[in-house]
Amino acid sequence: MVSSPTPGAEALWGSAGREDEILQDLYEMGDTEGYVPFPQPGGLISWAGSNAGDSFYWRTGPADPDAWPVVVRGDNGDWSEFPVGAVEFLAGVYGRTIDVPGMPRGFPSDDPKVLGLSDRID
């Protein structure tokens, strides 16, 4: 699920805010493999999560935000970094040109679908 704040209601940015709190807790326990939470320099900001417990972050930096790499914390505790933006990352995962260690086998399926909030799976 990709999070998207409503303009003017960023403080209510649900799941991404919870992921950032979890990241802070992991950091305080020394379980982030050197990654740090935002607003520290190079800190991570959550932008998506999977229903399998994987978390997806941008690693911030002084460069243009479009150049921020994607960092994945797998549900099994693996950390991986990809030198691409979010859109290129998602296209690569769904196009099977980017392999994310620790993701469930068979992900994505042979016929993946991207759904909006108003879409339903019957």
Image (tube, rainbow, N blue to C red):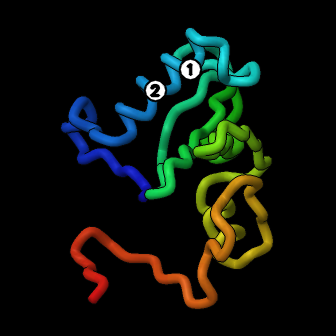
Residue at 28%, 40% in the rendered image: 14
Q: Amino acid at mark 2?
A: Ile
Question: Dot 1, crowdedness within 10 Å: few (<14), some or many (≥20)?
Answer: some
Residue name at image x 35 percent, y 51 percent: 4
The residue depicted at 48 percent of the width and 82 percent of the height is 113
Q: Is residue 13 left or right of residue 39?
A: left
Q: Which residue is mark 1?
A: 26
* Residue 21 position in % (x across, y down): 41, 23
Residue 2 image-quadrant placement: bottom left
Q: Give the secondary structure at mark 1.
A: helix
Residue at 43 percent of width and 34 percent of height: 19
For the N terminus, the image quarter is bottom left
Work out which residue is located at the far top of the displayed protein and give it: 28
Residue 20 is left or right of residue 56, and the answer is left
Q: Secondary structure at mark 2?
A: helix
Q: Is residue 63 left or right of residue 49?
A: right
> Between 103 and 81, which is closer to the camera in this rendering?
103
Q: Quadrant of the C terminus?
A: bottom left
Estimate the x, y position of residue 52 in percent, counting from the top left.
Answer: 50, 56
Q: Position of residue 104 (x, y in %)?
A: 64, 64
Give the camera-side residue of 23 and 38. Answer: 23
The answer to which image quadrant residue 36 occupies is top right
Badge 2, how many Cα within 10 Å: few under 14, some, many 20+?
some
Question: Taking 5 as reference, is 24 above or below it?
Answer: above
Relative to 68, residue 94 above or below: below
State yes or no: discs 1 and 2 in contact (Cβ < 8 Å): yes
Image location (x, y in percent) of residue 57: 58, 40
Q: Which mark is residue 69?
A: none
Residue wearing tag 2:
22
Q: Quadrant of residue 73?
A: top right
Question: How far apart are the two marked residues, 1 and 2, measured between alpha carbons?
Answer: 6 Å
